[in-house]
Image (spheres, rainbow, N blue to C red):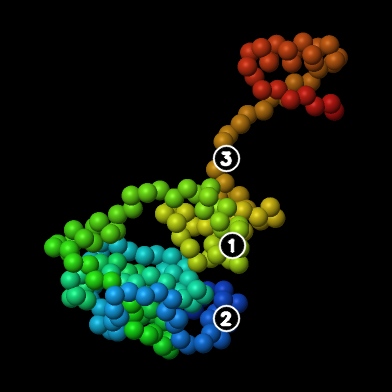
Amino acid sequence: MIDNDDFLKWFKKQDKKFLKWFNKLEKKIKIKCKGSGTLELGKFQTFQGNLKKIEYKNLLKLIKSILKIGFIAPIFIWNNKNEILDGNQRLTALYFLDGQGFHIPDIPIVNITAKNKKEALLVITSHYADVNIEVANEWVLEIGDDIGDIIRIQDFDIELSDFEDNNKIDERDINYNEKYELIVLCDTEIDLKNLYDRLIEENYKCKISIL
């Protein structure tokens, strides 16, 4: 769970352009999925406690995704008891938006008839397959439209600008492999060639520069 007041303070410090866009939105969340039934936002119950947590920056991505493309995945509940098996973070985003004056329609749900709710939660939470990041990057470039601003895959935050040729990269984020360079000045081309050939034979990587 997050501290709503603290998150709101953090939220208000975001980019002015984004906040201006946010404040001009129609105050209604669009539901873009169907389940076996629906449930009012205030009737969900959580039991996972501190099993999972979400960072503010990732909650913001989730909020943006709901605002931009709608609510697109039902909430999984356990044995018709309104207890959440999957969807706590999406509901956290909706609770925040509800607090900001957005109308939240009834939420599509899927009922999971498992014997043990904690066992079911752990299975649903598990990630058995790894995403091919190269393919994901290709999809990001293909889709464009700042899709990287609203998605998070595994432990990778994908931003469209990360894959554009003109992107400015913060050098602090680059891991350099240290290399050492030795500059040798030779008097003649013959000396240069002899030295070059000898170093190449000894598996050194050499580059000739004419000063």
Q: Residue at x 70, y 22 (%)?
A: 206
Q: Give residue 194's position: percent from left, percent from top.
A: 77, 10
- Amino acid type of the residue tagged 1 in the rendering: Ile
The alpha-carbon separation of the residues under discs 2 and 1 comes to 21 Å
Assign the C terminus to one quadrant of the image: top right
Q: Secondary structure at mark 2?
A: helix
Badges 2 and 1: C-beta atoms under 8 Å apart? no
Q: Position of residue 4 (x, y in %)?
A: 36, 78
Q: Which type of secondary structure does the marked residue at label 3 adopt?
A: loop
Q: Quadrant of residue 139?
A: bottom right
Q: Nearer the viewer, mark 3 or mark 1?
A: 1
Q: How far apart are labels 3 and 1 at the CA level? A: 31 Å
206 vs 179: above or below: above
Q: Earlier in the sequence, mark 3 or mark 1?
A: 1
In this view, 102 is above or below 140: below
Q: Which mark is residue 91?
A: none
- Neighbourhood count class around disc 1 (C-alpha, 10 Å): few under 14, some 14–19, many 20 upward: few
Residue at image location 42% in from the left, 72% down from the top:
72
The residue nearer to you, when weighing 44 against 210, is 44
**Observer-nearest of 185 and 97:** 97
Q: Please tell me in which quadrant of the rendered image residue 33 appears.
A: bottom left
Name the quarter where the N terminus is drawn: bottom left
Residue beneath disc 3:
176
Q: Amino acid at mark 3?
A: Tyr
Cα–Cα gap, marks 2 and 3: 38 Å
Image: 186 above or below 126? above
> Which residue does the image show at 18% across and 58% down from the upper left?
119
Q: Where is mark 2, residue-wise? A: 21
Q: Residues within 10 Å of mark 3 (few under 14, many from 20)?
A: few
- The residue that disc 1 covers is 143
Residue drawn at x 52%, y 57% is: 158
